[in-house]
Amino acid sequence: MSQTTPSIGDALAATVPMVRTLNLVFDEITAERAVLRLPDQPDYHNHVGGPHAGAMFTLAESASGAIVLAAFGDQLSRAVPLAVKAEIGYKKLAMGPVTATAELGRPAAEVVAELDAGQRPEFPVRVSITREDGAETGEMTIWWTLRPNK
């Protein structure tokens, strides 16, 4: 599916209040990857002056949602995407703005083939969280499903 960044970003901002609350910036959204940025905002700092872990979790989960919509938006008439579980690892101190880059962990065609076969497919989305200097501060895997409509 070929969605433009503004349409998916606008949809997420309209339907997910935390996206608006954190002022997330949509830098790139394609079916291959999504790149979102969390600006440096003192209201969302932790005790050491960097972005709060909850804000970084929300950033990464939002990036995963953006790529899921880009890759499977054409399936929304027959299935709803739902996050099933998530695991995050914080690797280095994050300071300043941070960026989350999400990529599908399975080919979209495989996932759609399972949906076509009447299954409820699950698939991982891997997200890397980085600082402005490029250092990876965290990594997250969110498992999604496409739940068939009844």
Image (cartoon, grey):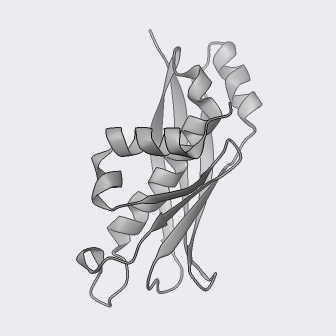
Q: Residue 115, relative to residue 12: is it above or below?
A: above
Tell me residue 113's x, y (percent): 73, 21
- Name the residue located 32 percent from the left edge and 62 percent from the top edge: 22
Q: Quadrant of residue 136?
A: bottom right
| Camera-nearest residue between 132 and 91 | 132
Q: Which quadrant of the figure contains the N terminus?
A: top right
Image quadrant occupied by the C terminus? top left
Which residue corresponds to the image point at 62% horizontal and 83% vertical from the top-left? 135
Q: Is residue 117 left or right of residue 42?
A: right
Look at the picture and state if 43 lies above or below 142: below
Which image quadrant for residue 117? top right
Q: Residue at x 42, y 38 (%)?
A: 11
Q: How many marks?
A: 0
Location of residue 139 by image quarter: bottom right
Residue in the image at 59% along x and 21% along y:
75
Q: Is residue 40 above or below residue 68?
A: below
Q: Is residue 73 left or right of residue 82?
A: right
* Percent coordinates x, y for residue 4 in the rendering: 60, 40
